[in-house]
Image (cartoon, rainbow, N blue to C red):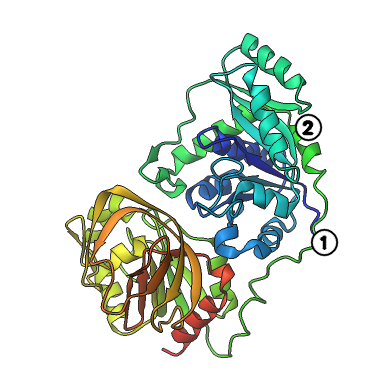
Amino acid sequence: MVSTPRLVIAAPASNSGKTTVATGLMAAFAARGLAVSPHKVGPDYIDPGYHSLATGRPGRNLDAYMCGTDLIAPLFAHGAAGCDLAVVEGVMGLYDGASGQGELASTAQVAKLLRAPVVLVVDASSQSRSVAALVHGFASWDPEVRIGGVILNKVASDRHEALLRDALDESGLPVLGVIRRAPQVATPSRHLGLVPVAERQGDAVDAVRAMGERVRAGCDLDALMALARTAPALADEAWEPAYAPAESSGGPRPVVAVAGGAAFTFAYAEHAELLTAAGAEVVVFDPLRDEKLPVGTAGLVIGGGFPEMYAPELSANEPLRRAVTELALSGAPVAAECAGLLYLARELDGKPMCGVLDATARMSERLTLGYRQAVAVSDSPLAAAGTRMRGHEFHRTVLEPGAGPVPAWGMHQPERRVEGYVQRGVHASYLHTHWAASPEVARRFVEHCRAR
């Protein structure tokens, strides 16, 4: 049974202040000495970095599209084990989910799967009495979604607050916080959202501290904790990476090098856990600074991030580029997603990269964004031909050509196409996947590393 007190922080629409409030709540409760488990609905990699900074624990994603609805509560229980409180930041508007698929992957669906009360963050900057109609509509739309209170954001004055409170008195929902209109906390954005924590370091610490102070000053933390404690126990067993793959064979643990640092910040915590459970020794390295791969590297995982922001620095690190190329050409298992795909290309925005793939990459004005259904076109260390997975694309770059002689995936949503590269031991693609949904991926990858 999972009895962790929990809250889902949602909003009527994007840009209402969910991230500020959710991260601020995490920081404020952590400052009280509570162990806070941070979660994010959807595939986003960036917000969990701020959550982790606020709580000192890995930020974890709950994505019902990529992982399936049956895994949401077990993954939540895995992350929240031993914690005093869990805070789940929603995605987009409360009822927005995968395009054209009803409530799938919406914040509302995740809240129902977790049986968690919802706190609605409302941007009140351009309304007064109408806020009651807005809140009433969201609270009554789906009777299975329990909205337990409202936090009013961007409130202009005492008079404005009084008008909002009077209106909401008629709704029957308590006001759990009022955050005044103020200069935005310094969390700069660029083409794919907030700038990741790893790129901001001290500034990110200051930003999270400021969020915590604003939330602590404006919200009733005791009432919010009391609401979190009304969440009933969940009967689901916690997901456990040690049980997900088959038991690994004996012998030394192969070293799997995982790219990190400021250029490669997109990673789900469960991936490293699955690799470790499958028998690997996971070692993180930074392609911006390290001139060698970790000693004994048998396999390489290069996830997503922002290599386009660091193309000159990545290119200048010639010793590491040579080491990556030599490893890939030797037939070692290499799994590359999005940023990793670009790093393995011949060049990125005119800057030489590793040259493992006969392709060039460049920034684009067009944002490619959305969930995908995919099937592995051919055998690779990552997936056997015919393996079906769900994933997510999220980039403003273009790779030419987009697929090699042996593509990685055949896409079936939203259009039919082939994409990515499989050559020697390399599997490289724009597609982000969540291995918790297919733990055999990690086991297969480690088995290929062990066979080296």
Q: Quadrant of the N terminus?
A: bottom right
Q: Quadrant of residue 75?
A: bottom right
Q: CA distance from mark 1 to mark 2?
A: 24 Å
Seen in the picture, residue 356 relative to 21 is either above or below; the reply is: below
Give residue 268's position: percent from left, percent from top: 52, 61
Report crowding for label 2: few under 14, some 14 to 19, many 20 or more residues within 10 A (C-alpha): some
Give residue 437's position: percent from left, percent from top: 58, 69
Seen in the picture, residue 69 relative to 170 is either above or below; the reply is: below
Q: Is residue 358 visible?
A: yes
User: Reading the chain from its start, which is encountered first: label 1 or label 2?
Assistant: 1
Amino acid at the residue labelled 1: Met
Give residue 396's position: percent from left, percent from top: 32, 51
Give residue 305's position: percent from left, percent from top: 39, 55
Q: Quadrant of the C terminus?
A: bottom left
The foreground one among 270 and 89 is 89
At mark 2, the secondary structure is helix
Residue drawn 60% across and 35% down? 21
Q: Quadrant of residue 63?
A: bottom right
Q: Which mark is residue 223?
A: 2
Residue drawn 54% across and 36% down? 13
Amino acid at the residue labelled 2: Ala
Q: Do the numbered discs 1 and 2 sit on residues whose CB atoms are within 8 Å?
A: no
Q: Which mark is residue 1?
A: 1
152 horizontally vs 352: left or right: right
Residue drawn 26% across and 62% down? 399
294 horizontally vs 361: left or right: right
Q: Is residue 37 visible?
A: no
The foreground one among 355 and 150 is 150
Q: Quadrant of residue 181?
A: top right
296 horizontally vs 388: left or right: left
Residue drawn 57% across and 46% down? 51
